[in-house]
Image (spheres, rainbow, N blue to C red):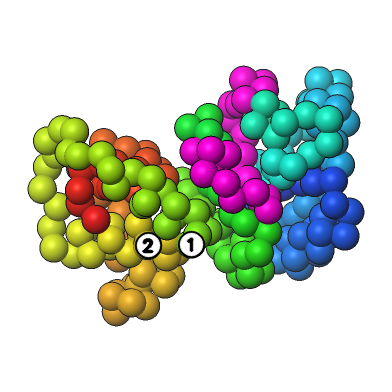
Amino acid sequence: MSSAPITLWIIEDHEIFAKHIRRLIDGEDDMACPRHFSNATDLFDQLQNFPERPDMLLLDLGLPRRDGLEILNDLRKMIPEVKVLILTAHDDREKVYRAICNGASGYLLKTADPDEILAGIRDVMHGSSALSSPIAKMILEGFSRYGPVDQIEPLTARESEVLRELVKGFIKKEIGDHLSISQHTVDMHLRSVYRKLHVRSQTEAVSKALRQGLA
């Protein structure tokens, strides 16, 4: 029996872009996008008055009347079990860091190609995180000024290679292609990296790797 499709809601005030993303998602066998909200008020009315919940929310930070980061904070308090993936045009450093620190499961730019967006959604649903390459680079530059902070279990040579690819912003399929290993093997190495770094997501792994000087 096939599993139920990933259910996504979009919070996006740009109607044309929202329609484009809905068509992209609904064109996949394992995803569905039944709801689109152009503002936070309609979204919270839905959440407060009806029991329906998505698996994931795609949140634009440039919404009218309310700051997207405030919306993110409220969502994490109200529906902590629902993953929130930022999909926005905003790439300024402060918004990126605040979104990640405040519980976003990933941060993709609207300029990302469709395959990157779909791969990011699947990565988040499978417990990883999603970062557009420019965002990963920004995180690298932002954390490079910090020195090592604590001792960790040593990584194997292959685990270090996988981690360096992750820091560069590559998705798991790309890492596998670059290192000539299967995506399953990449997943295996990432699980070991997460355990050794005492982290639970790609974003946390990238942050700690850079702070520790591991990448």
According to the picture, the residue beneath numbered tag 2 turns out to be 168
Question: Is 190 rendered above or below residue 113?
Answer: above
At 32% from the left and 38% from the top, the residue drawn is 199
Residue 59: quarter of image: top right
Which span is picked out in magenta? 73-97
Q: Point out residue 111 in the picture as x, y percentages from the top left corner.
A: 66, 64
Whole-angstrom CA distance, mark 1 to mark 2, is: 7 Å
Q: Is residue 93 magenta?
A: yes
User: Foreground residue, 38 or 26?
Assistant: 38
Upstream in the sequence, badge 1 or badge 2? 1
Judged left or right of residue 89, residue 13 is right
Q: Which mark is residue 133?
A: 1
Indicate the quadrant where residue 162 lies.
bottom left
Neighbor class of circle 2 (other Cα within 10 Å; few <14, some 14-19, many 20+) is many
Between 57 and 27, the one lying in front of the other is 57
State yes or no: discs 1 and 2 in contact (Cβ < 8 Å): yes
Q: Is residue 108 above or below residue 195?
A: below
Question: Does 80 appear in magenta?
Answer: yes
Quadrant in which the C terminus appears: bottom left
**Residue at left offset 20%, top offset 39%:** 147
Element type at mark 1: helix
| Residue 6, image x, y percentages | 66, 51
